[in-house]
Image (cartoon, coloured by chain):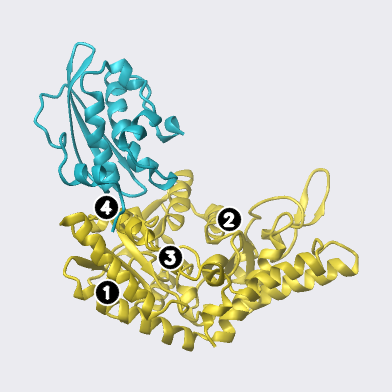
Chain colours: A yellow, B cyan
């Protein structure tokens, strides 16, 4: 069976070549069905409703939490907090765990972070008079572990599991070990990593990890924070309102326990259920198969791009420590013109800074073109794109 | 491939006003940080009139061609008239449909030019919102 058939957008747009999966993936029919089924057969608010419909909705919502917990190998399902995306999950940690930090404490980031894993920390640093320090990039395009950066002042290390620009996968375990050795906690931005590699938060011994549903073939507007129970428990609530309390009086309130404490208001119930269905879809396919298909495609793409002497790959040219996100530049042609050229032939890619301006500044580049592949892409699509790249190059330079 | 109108491609490859030698009395630089386009405007002013327009820059074909075509329009205009110039007037001269996703590219030259004048008058600078 062709996996492409699982994704209705390709029925509606048979000519579409979608190479922008790192921005957002397409959704399989099973995810759309799960959301639709909630609205059409058991739509109700959750948790508080004393009726059978509310109970049914609550069971499905909490079942989705269990699926996401299993997906990242969490010990307890209440260690998963549903958020609207990875950005909100990072902000949640910055606004709760971050408030426990003291002036002169250090937050360690890497130079290849997405803006969403930079800006919340810059703001926190300003509020609390903290210092931000930066892990550099090694010659093989990965986050460089510089032991000199790890000292007792470091309280948090926030690092990506996989670069959304370079495609490289971070060697997380040594970084987490180095952080724990000085008493620092670690937050991993797994927005990209979770799409391509199996994750076990227990094996990594990571403290916080964030996900976004829409890159994992799930709906937009839903994401998750994993946090160790013993870390989440003492933290103050993030947003205040309904559902996050256990009792409210006229002069005080008692927050609910995990996970409700961090899920104020009616959440994205349909989104969470869709997220659960997406995780089911990935589990059914299995990472072994996903990686085999994506590696084959990535290898083909890298080989073909390397053959064009006017293309420079920004990132590793082999499959070592990398996923299917491939950035490149074309000599004499701006990345946006490359993207427009491909777009005119029905091929979607991303171009620009990819929300990683510090990385671009570090590389002294004014943007890249990025092709990010999924298992539903084909070698024929890559061939087609290569032909268009050649056309674009002659159009702009000859 | 037929991506942009021929005039855009021509002016991108063979600009008239790019890196032209002028005696600038006004100078300004702006960038579009979402894609890395940069334009630097150098203006020779005589009284209240822009006598010569020159720019330097780096960026996509639309940003650079638009900054160049802008020079055809503004040389000889009063500074006040330049500040009153609209997005529509510029886009009409480009001769192509500017999609929403490329409109900041096309406006970068005009923003840089108008802010050069505002900067010299110590007036508040414009942002992209001015054109929306």
* Residue B124 higher or lower than A273, as above or below: above
Q: Is mark 4 on a helix, strand or loop?
A: loop
Q: Dot 4 surroundings within 10 Å: few (below 14), some, or many (20 or more)? A: many
Residue A204 visible (yes or no): yes
User: Quick check: A10 above or below B65?
Assistant: below
Image position of B42 with respect to A155: above or below: above
SS of the residue under disc 1: loop
Picture quadrant of residue A177: bottom left
The N terminus of chain A, quarter of image = bottom right
Q: For the residues marked 2 and 1, what is the alpha-carbon distance in whole angstroms?
A: 37 Å
Residue that carries the numbered disc 4 in the rendered image: A366
Circles 2 and 1, Cβ within 8 Å, touching? The answer is: no
Give the alpha-carbon distance from disc 4 to disc 1, as whole Å.
19 Å
Q: Position of residue A17 (x, y in %)?
A: 43, 69
| Badge 4 and badge 2 in a common chain | yes
Looking at the image, is mark 4 or mark 1 earlier in the sequence?
1
- Frontmost of labels 4 and 3 is 3
Residue that label 2 marks = A96
Q: Could you tell me how far apart the alpha carbons at marks 1 and 3 are, in whole angstroms?
A: 19 Å
Q: In which quarter of the image is residue A184?
A: bottom left
Assign a secondary structure to mark 2.
helix
If you read the primary sequence from the N terminus, does the residue marked by circle 4 or circle 2 appear first?
A: 2
What residue is shown with label 3?
A20
Q: Quadrant of residue A22?
A: bottom left
């Amino acid at each position: 069976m062709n996996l492409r058939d699982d994704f209705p957008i390709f029925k509606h747009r048979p000519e579409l070549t979608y190479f922008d999966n790192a921005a957002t993936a397409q959704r399989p029919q099973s995810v759309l069905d799960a959301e639709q089924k909630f609205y059409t057969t058991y739509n109700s608010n959750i948790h508080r409703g004393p009726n059978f419909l509310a109970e049914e909705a609550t069971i499905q919502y909490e079942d989705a939490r269990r699926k996401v917990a299993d997906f990242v190998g969490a010990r307890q399902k209440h260690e998963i907090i549903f958020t609207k995306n990875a950005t909100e999950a990072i902000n949640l940690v910055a606004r709760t765990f971050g408030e426990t930090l003291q002036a002169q404490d250090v937050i360690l980031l890497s130079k290849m972070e997405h803006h969403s894993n930079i800006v919340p920390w810059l703001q926190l640093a300003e509020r609390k008079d903290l210092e931000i320090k930066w892990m550099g990039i090694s010659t093989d395009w990965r986050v460089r572990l510089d032991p000199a950066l790890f000292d007792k002042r470091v309280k948090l290390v926030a690092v990506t599991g996989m670069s959304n620009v370079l495609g490289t996968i971070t060697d997380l375990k040594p970084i987490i070990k180095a952080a724990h050795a000085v008493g620092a906690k670690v937050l991993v931005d797994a927005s990209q990593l979770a799409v391509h590699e199996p994750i076990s938060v227990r094996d990594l011994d990571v403290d916080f990890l964030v996900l976004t549903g829409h890159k994992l073939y799930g709906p937009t507007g839903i994401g998750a924070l994993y946090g160790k129970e013993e870390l989440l428990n003492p933290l103050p609530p993030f947003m205040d309102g309904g559902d996050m309390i256990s009792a409210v009086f006229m002069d005080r309130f008692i927050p609910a326990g995990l996970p409700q404490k961090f899920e104020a208001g009616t959440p994205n119930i349909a989104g969470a259920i869709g997220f659960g269905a997406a995780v089911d879809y990935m589990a059914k396919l299995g990472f072994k198969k996903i990686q085999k298909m994506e590696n084959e495609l990535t290898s083909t793409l890298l080989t073909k791009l390397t053959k064009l002497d006017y293309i420079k790959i920004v990132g590793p040219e082999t499959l070592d420590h990398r996923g299917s996100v491939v950035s490149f530049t074309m000599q004499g042609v701006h990345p946006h013109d490359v993207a427009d050229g491909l777009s005119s032939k029905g091929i979607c890619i991303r171009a620009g800074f990819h929300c990683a301006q510090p990385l671009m500044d570090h590389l002294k580049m004014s943007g890249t073109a990025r092709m990010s592949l999924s298992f539903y892409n084909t070698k024929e699509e890559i061939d087609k794109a290569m032909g268009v790249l050649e056309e674009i190059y002659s159009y702009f330079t000859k | 491939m037929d991506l942009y109108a021929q005039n855009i491609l021509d002016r991108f490859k063979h600009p008239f006003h790019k890196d032209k030698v002028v005696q600038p009395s006004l100078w300004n630089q702006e960038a579009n940080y979402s894609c890395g386009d940069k334009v630097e405007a150098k203006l020779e002013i005589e009284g209240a009139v822009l006598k010569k327009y020159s720019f330097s820059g780096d960026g996509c074909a639309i940003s650079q061609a638009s900054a160049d075509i802008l020079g055809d329009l503004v040389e000889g205009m009063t500074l006040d008239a330049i500040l009153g110039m609209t997005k529509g007037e510029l886009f009409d001269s480009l001769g192509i449909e500017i999609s929403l996703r490329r409109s900041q590219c096309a406006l970068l030259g005009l923003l840089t030019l108008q802010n050069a004048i505002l900067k010299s008058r110590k007036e508040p600078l414009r942002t992209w919102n001015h054109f929306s």
